Image (spheres, grey):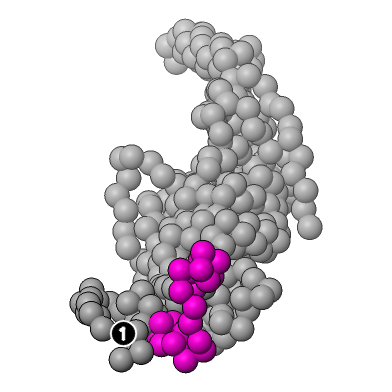
Amino acid sequence: MNKEKVVRVRSGWGMFGAVIVMLLLSVALFVLFIASVGGDEMPSVLGWVELVVSIVVFVVACIMFGGFFTLQPNEARVLVLFGKYKGTVRDSGFFWGNPFYTNASLGVDKNTEEPNETASQTSTGHNHKKPQEGSRGKLSLRARTLNSERIKVNDRHGNPIEIAMVVVWRVHDTAQAVFDVNDYQTYVDSQSEIALRHVASVYSYDQEEDAEIVPEITLRGNVEDVSAALKVELETRLSVAGVVVDDARLTHLAYATEIAQAMLRRQQAEAVIAALKKIVEGAVGMVDMAITSLEAKHVLELDDERKAAMVSNLMVVLCGESNAQPIVNTGSLYV
């Protein structure tokens, strides 16, 4: 595994002035050589020396021009000399380095977010941009956003679900990103999808009925916990490419279309059962309170049969969906 080594190079302004002086010197020596040639006479030895020096200085100046490069903030350049990694320049500005430094082979930048670029939709569903890296050996260190497409996976209980995520990532170690994987951006795309599938298969979509006593972490009910687990999974997989994950969140979560209607009816049934359970519990408490209060205040005394009848009537009144119609009894309670 490679490790990034930060290096510093010369400021480009001083070397730029030196190159300009060399070019002017080359032109001056060439002019002196032309001036020394008169008529049909052969140039003197000094004249030939001036010509040779002029050519050599001009060639050296042209070679030195290849060492100039600029870096913007949050941009780096990986330096390779004859196939050997020499270091990474992370400072922004105008610099000059060894003109024989070659640019490291970088993958196509698919996620660099530039406002003037035109996006293209790929077969994987990611919005990719035009290449920004590779031609000049520059590597973007800016935070990037990966919006995954909706994928179909099975949760822990085998239920098919649709899930998608958004990942904010950036390059942390340029040496690992360039030399340890073939194309770090493609690596991020593929490993992010694998991590999402793995995390979705570990948790259930929703709480199961038999898990009420010991609550479990679910995709729908514990979004923060699932997002934290997803971030850890991504960091583990992407560390090989020198990439760190700043944030990872689920952006879409739903049952697959083939079971969505059945699961919706199940959720509605569970909601109805929970509501009826609350109503019955409240009705039982009110009936108990009414009978206890009547007996405590000696308003009337009821035997078990009449008490059961009163409980039945009160439960019908309290649990019924429609309003009860009162019946006035003008006779005896036992008639």
**Residue 290, percent from left and from top:** 46, 69
Closer-to-camera residue (246/5): 246
Query: Is 30 placed above or below 121 here?
Result: above
Q: Residues in magenta?
A: 291-312
Tell me where residue 46 sits by quadrant: top right
Q: Is residue 80 left or right of residue 302?
A: right
- The amino acid on which the numbered mark 1 sits, given as a three-letter code, is Ser
Q: Residue at x 57, y 56 (%)?
A: 224
Quadrant showing the N terminus: bottom right
Quadrant showing the C terminus: bottom left
Observer able to see residue 228: yes
**Residue 107, percent from left and from top:** 53, 56
**Residue 103, percent from left and from top:** 60, 45
Which secondary structure dominates the residues rendered in magenta? helix
Tell me where residue 258 sits by quadrant: bottom left
Q: Is residue 238 left or right of residue 28?
A: right
